[in-house]
Image: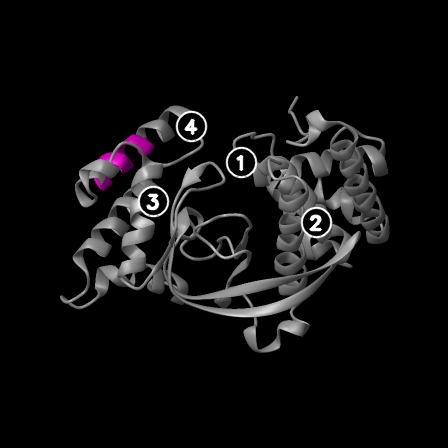
């Protein structure tokens, strides 16, 4: 078992003085993580069972929905000295629960602007949501953005142990996949407050392709995760990026073969990614009906 997995499971191995309520909440979510898959019917049942499992652990007035339950959990975990972020990551529920935050200010360059933004480095996690659990700590969300949420200070939120905290200026993954990706979200949430998750991810992933200089850093993962699964904004955004680049560069409707793309100069991918980003912005700005998003599906 790797170190990250030991950390996320540590409440189960704590001494007898550990908080039983915290352990029971984590157990409810972990059981939910074990039962989810890509089947709609299965996930509806899993979500129902999660709510039933959490109900005895929260006051009667908060039991009507998972959203109401998690609003209470946010407050109760804060009372116990933790931060709690509920809601959905992709198509599934799964909280992020951590102990400590450190704030730093950064200036970030994007293709059409420079922005100043606070980054909140998060430490000592009890839960890193469903992906971390299901992959035994090998994969997880490493950050997100908050803007206009009354429960959170505006800024970028960063899972500290995902990056080289002592050498952030030299950490390309932090500089591009965290700072620029999430800063694009931050800017878009200001320009288009109701923009869909798919459109947000589409734009932020294109930013990464523009600023990275090699295919291996981001484009390979976009190819591998791309899927026409509309319920998963990350995979669906990657699908539309790959579709757009296939049409622009290869004059093909959709090429997912990683080896095929290896022969394409990365400078060409960068240029066309910027073109897709700019074309998307023109669509958003060109019609008020597009301000919620232009990726509608096929």
> CB under 8 Å between callouts 2 and 4?
no
Residue in the foreground of this view, choosing between 264 and 95: 95
Query: Which of the 4 image quadrants contains residue 191?
Result: top right
Task: Nearest to the eye among marks 1 and 3: give it.
Answer: 3
- If you read the primary sequence from the N terminus, does the residue marked by circle 2 or circle 1 appear first? 2
Spatial CA distance of label 2 from label 3 is 37 Å
Tell me which colouring the rendered structure shows.
Answer: one colour
Q: Residue furthest top?
A: 298
Q: For this view, does 11 lie left or right of residue 271?
A: left
- Identify the residue position indicated by label 4 in the image: 39
Residue 122's x, y, as percent? Answer: 46, 64
Residue in the foreground of this view, choosing between 45 and 110: 110
Task: Nearest to the eye among marks 2 and 3: give it.
Answer: 3
Q: Residue furthest left?
A: 16
Q: For this view, does 123 lie left or right of residue 234?
A: left
Q: Which mark is residue 71?
A: 3
């Amino acid at each position: 078992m790797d170190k990250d997995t030991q950390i996320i499971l540590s409440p189960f191995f704590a001494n007898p003085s550990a908080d039983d309520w915290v352990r029971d909440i984590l157990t409810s979510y972990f059981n939910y993580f074990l039962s989810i898959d890509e089947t709609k019917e299965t996930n509806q049942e899993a979500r129902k069972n999660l709510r039933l499992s959490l109900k005895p652990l929260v006051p009667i007035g908060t039991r009507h929905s998972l959203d109401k339950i998690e609003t209470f959990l946010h407050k109760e975990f804060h009372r116990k000295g933790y931060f709690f972020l509920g809601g959905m990551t992709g198509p599934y529920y799964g909280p992020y629960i951590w102990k400590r935050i450190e704030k730093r200010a950064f200036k970030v360059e994007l293709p059409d602007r420079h922005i100043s933004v606070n980054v909140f480095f998060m430490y000592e996690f009890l839960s890193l949501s469903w992906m971390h659990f299901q992959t035994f700590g090998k994969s997880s969300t490493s950050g997100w953005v908050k803007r206009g949420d009354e429960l959170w200070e505006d800024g970028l939120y960063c899972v500290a142990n995902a990056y080289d905290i002592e050498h952030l200026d030299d950490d390309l993954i932090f500089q591009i996949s965290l700072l620029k990706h999430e800063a694009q979200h931050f800017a878009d949430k200001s320009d288009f407050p109701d923009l869909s998750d798919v459109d947000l991810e589409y734009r932020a992933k294109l930013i990464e392709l523009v600023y990275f200089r090699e295919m291996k850093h981001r484009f390979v993962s976009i190819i591998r995760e791309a899927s026409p699964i509309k319920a998963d904004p990350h995979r669906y955004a990657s699908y539309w990026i790959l579709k757009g680049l296939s049409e622009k560069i290869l004059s093909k409707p959709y090429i997912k073969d990683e080896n095929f793309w290896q022969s394409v100069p990365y400078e060409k991918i960068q240029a066309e990614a910027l073109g897709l980003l700019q074309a998307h912005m023109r669509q958003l700005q060109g019609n008020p009906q597009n301000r919620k998003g232009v990726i509608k599906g096929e």
